[in-house]
Amino acid sequence: MKKKMILDIDSVGDDILAVLFTALNKNIDLLGVTTVAGACGDIRQAAWVALHTIELTDKDIPVYVGASDPFSPQASDSAGDPVNFFEEVRWKFGDRLLEFNTPATKPSTEAREEHAADYLVREFNRHPGEITLVTTGPLTNIALALEKDPSIAKKIKEAYVLGGAFQTYGNITPVTEYNIFADPEAANIVLNSDMKITLVPLDVCENNQFADSMLTRDHIADMEYAASGNKIVTFIAEKYPIYIDVWREYFQLGGFPMDDVMTAALATDEDLCRYSEPVHVEVELSGKLTRGQTIPFFGYQINKYPQRAHKNVRIAQWIDGKRFMNLFVETIVSGS
């Protein structure tokens, strides 16, 4: 039986690959895609990118436009643009950067009129205990849905949330990961709900210990060899070499990290990873460098924290990268 899934995305590089993976995977029934501004920055662009990607798959999957701003907007103390760091690598890549996060044109299909948060409330109430939620951007839409109807937390079969950093450095401040940093209040609401949550942090996504889980030119060549002329493979082959190069140059990674695809893949095959025992994770809501930090209550402390009894997540800690990338390549080649 196919797993019913809703995918909540902010429509940048690996979100696109996550849409392709979930739409084409024979074990997933992708009920809908909801969009949040997040890394894309423009909620209209987020929806347009999602719609174009779904058109590429020839599937009929609805898109619902969600939040354009954080749950509780606050001025950021960070320096620079957290997403578009072009100027720091322009010396090496020049005009090739025009291929990176290219603005989408108006698609031939349109997003549904219903707000993403309303759709989430409706769908989880309609199929209680049946739908897996996968989030790959800031958690604003999910927090808004919980605010409208807190009961849906127990009606979601399980949630796989891309976010946080524990053993590795953050990608915004030294201790914060983008999705949580972008809307800490929303993340705090979601993590402290009654949802069954698996947190997928940078530890397993953007860590060279798991470099075999990253997209490389070899993977693209394998797809081209297996499905020459296929429009989805051609799209990936044209679009993603610059992503591979930028992440290798700027972040010193072995390839392009597949954070979003990995989060969706674990929802279909949890044995791809090893996980922590359930633990309470708190989101820090203040601090110049720490706002958005995810803090796990491991170990023993003299101070007593009653909230640690609420073991709200398990954390992905190790991934079988080779098997994961084989799954991705096979899904794209066989499903397209």
Image (tube, rainbow, N blue to C red):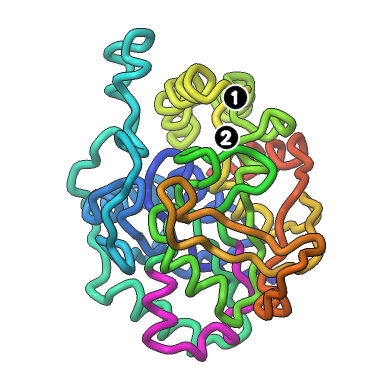
In this rendering, position of residue 258 left or right of residue 316: left
Say whether residue 108 is magenta: no
**Left or right of 126, for residue 84:** left
Magenta-drawn stretch contains 152: yes
Residue beneath the point at 36% across and 37% down: 83
- The answer to whether residue 182 is seen in the rendering is yes
Looking at the rendering, the stretch of residues picked out in magenta corresponds to 141-160
Q: Which mark is residue 253?
A: 1
Q: Looking at the image, can residue 241 be seen?
A: no
Kindly give the residue lying farthest to the front in the view shown.
Answer: 302
- Residue at 24 percent of width and 37 percent of height: 103
Q: Mark 1 and mark 2 in contact (Cβ < 8 Å)?
A: yes
- Kind of residue indicated by mark 2: Pro
The residue singled out by tag 2 in the image is: 257
Quarter assignment of residue 303: bottom right
Seen from the viewer's position, the closer of residues 113 and 291 is: 291
- Closer to the camera: disc 2 or disc 1? 1
Up-down: is 80 above or below 31?
above
Outermost residue toward the top in this view = 92
**Front position in the image: 19 or 316:** 316
* Label 1: which secondary element: loop
Q: Secondary structure at mark 2?
A: loop
